[in-house]
Image (tube, rainbow, N blue to C red):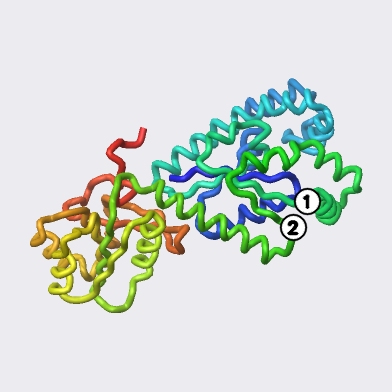
Amino acid sequence: MLNVALTGNIAAGKSTVVDLLRRWGATVIDADALAREAQAPGGEVLAAIVRRFGADVLASDGSLDRAALRGKVMGDQAALDALNQIVHPAVRHRRDDLVRAARESGDVLVVNDIPLLFEVLDPAEFDAVVLVDAPVPLRRTRLRAMRGLSNEEADRMIAAQMPAERKRGRSHFVIENDSSLDELERRARAVFEELRRRAAVAALGRPARTVLLVAAQQAEHPALNAIAARYADAGLAVRRVTGTAAAIDKALARSEQPDAIVATAAAAAAVEAAWARAGRHGILAALSDDPDPVAVRLDLRPWGYERLRLIEPGAVGLAPRVDLFPSANPLP
């Protein structure tokens, strides 16, 4: 799994990029949503905020009045630090739980949406850091247009964050948002394609060189196309064969045996027989609609297909694992 942090200062366009990455198949963990969850009425975080800042930060229904709290910390670094010390440990604990769950469920690409990444965390904790940035005058204009703020109010909000210039050199990718929405999408897509490639490599649990995909009919199965894209991004050679048992035998008789074979349900019986005749080299799996627990599950969302379940011969009743090439070391 590739664990990515995405950040950006206010009005830089980070939320738009997050929405694009989610639409393209990334799993998104939203730090702001986790903060709101942590600050819900009845929780220890909200109680600690009230103890530190007073009961006037509560709305009439007992929830947090965020505007009132913002007024107490805006421009007061000590107050802001105190608030961060209350909220962020709870947010981090919850985010760690969600990342762990994503890893265990086989998610390939996880994007953590963290506005204050550089202010409150160590970016080195993540496999890659993506910064969305825009010039300050443009961000000021956006704040005036979107929130109805004056220049002075917008400047106060901008000044409350670490300048983006200090973040750029510590980011692996910088997405410039100084043009049209179409241009932002094009730039974000280029970054996503590289993240997708890195995610495919990271998901490859052990060394492999070749994957063979087998279909019974000439018509291509969309899941096979997505599997081909994922393992090609991981650097594997992807071979494909369609048709008769003789063609399958020929594909498996080559000197370079595939490290894994994936067959459609219609081709599964013929492929298993050919695989046995060839000496059972490599991993064999087939697409299946079997509702029972299966041996392999793949996250193909970044490659344009939903999650996929594969079944291996003799695997009925076994707990799923997360990849064709699982690591020799089990998940902690």
64 with respect to 202 (left or right): right
292 with respect to 136 (left or right): left
Identified at 83% across, 30% down, the residue is 72
Q: Is residue 292 above or below residue 253?
A: above
- The N terminus - image quarter: top left
106 with respect to 39 (left or right): left
Q: x, y (%) of residue 131?
A: 64, 46
Q: Is residue 242 above or below residue 3?
A: below
> Pointer 2 and pointer 1: residues touching (CB < 8 Å)?
yes
Q: x, y (%) of residue 166?
A: 71, 38
Q: x, y (%) of residue 292?
A: 27, 53
User: Residue at the bottom extreme?
Assistant: 218
The dot on residue 326 is none
Identified at 91% across, 43% down, the residue is 152
Q: x, y (%) of residue 96?
A: 51, 34
144 with respect to 250 (left or right): right
Looking at the picture, which amino acid does disc 1 mark?
Pro
The answer to which of marks 2 and 1 sits earlier in the sequence is 1
Report whether residue 60 is seen: no
Identified at 70% across, 53% down, the residue is 13
Could you say whether the residue bearing mark 1 is in a helix, strand or loop? loop
**Tag 1: Cα neighbours inside 10 Å, few (<14), some, or many (≥20)?**
few
Instruction: State the count of labels.
Output: 2
The dot on residue 178 is 2
Looking at the picture, which amino acid does disc 2 mark?
Asp
Q: Is residue 89 above or below residue 232?
A: above
The dot on residue 135 is 1
Report whether residue 221 is seen: yes
